[in-house]
């Protein structure tokens, strides 16, 4: 299988795992909505982070307007920073709308899942981090196109993946 096909399969696995985790953590179902549509108003993202760290977001805007959605996504991203994710691990609010950069949303969910799993007080559903391994090929291919908007999140994911490999190698030795 060509690397581009493997990357597409890897992305699909990551999307499915991210959806499963989001639904299990928030106890809310995407239903027939696509990944983008389910997240674009930011409500589910805010619910996710409030489940991981209760009260971190004081108010979620439940109006069904684009401005309310953008506000929720920005509040979610600020809450991610409060939890310790750095700017390079966060997607840009416009990435939810742009199909070509939506992989950066997965990267943020990956880092948020890792953060939750490293919290000794978190006892909720676990994100299967292995499902995101296929993103590495996608991240590398996108990185070589060097779109400035996606460069930092992709680089952070690649760095994190390399770090995980290094950690695993040193656990074995």
Image (cartoon, helix red, strand yellow):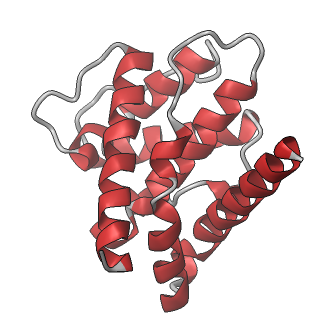
User: Is 72 displayed left or right of 51 in the figure?
Assistant: left
Question: Is residue 152 something that shows in the picture?
Answer: yes
The image quadrant where one finds the N terminus is bottom left
Give the residue drawn at x 74%, y 27%. 118
Q: Quadrant of residue 96?
A: bottom left
Q: Is residue 118 above or below residue 124?
A: below
Q: Quadrant of residue 82?
A: top right
In percent of width and height, residue 108 lies at 55, 49
Give the residue drawn at x 72%, y 45%. 85
Q: Is residue 72 above or below residue 22?
A: below
Give the residue drawn at x 55%, y 40%. 129
Tell which of 144 and 83 is nearer to you. 144
User: Is 46 displayed left or right of 159 in the figure?
Assistant: left
User: Is 46 displayed left or right of 40 in the figure?
Assistant: right
Tell which of 91 and 17 is nearer to you. 17
In percent of width and height, residue 46 lies at 47, 28
In percent of width and height, residue 7 lies at 37, 68
Tell which of 73 and 155 is nearer to you. 155
In percent of width and height, residue 9 lies at 30, 60
User: Is 51 displayed left or right of 169 in the figure?
Assistant: left
Question: Is residue 67 something that shows in the picture?
Answer: no
Residue farthest along the front direction in this orientation: 173
Q: Is residue 19 above or below residue 136?
A: above
Q: Quadrant of residue 78?
A: top right
Residue farthest along the bottom direction in this orientation: 145
């Amino acid at each position: 299988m060509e690397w581009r096909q493997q990357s597409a399969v890897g992305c699909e696995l990551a999307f499915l795992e991210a959806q499963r985790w989001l639904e299990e953590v928030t106890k809310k179902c995407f239903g027939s909505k696509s990944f983008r549509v389910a997240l674009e108003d930011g409500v589910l993202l805010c619910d996710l982070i409030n489940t991981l760290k209760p009260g971190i977001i004081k108010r979620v805007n439940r109006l069904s307007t684009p401005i309310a959605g953008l506000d929720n996504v920005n509040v979610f991203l600020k809450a991610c920073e409060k939890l310790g994710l750095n700017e390079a691990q966060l997607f840009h609010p416009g990435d939810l709308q742009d199909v070509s950069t939506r992989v950066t949303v997965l990267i943020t969910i990956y880092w948020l899942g890792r953060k939750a799993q490293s919290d000794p007080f978190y006892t909720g559903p676990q994100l299967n981090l292995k499902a995101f391994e296929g993103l590495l090929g996608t991240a590398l291919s996108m990185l070589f196109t060097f779109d400035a908007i996606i460069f930092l999140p992709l680089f952070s994911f690649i760095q994190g993946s390399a770090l995980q490999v290094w950690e695993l190698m040193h656990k074995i030795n």
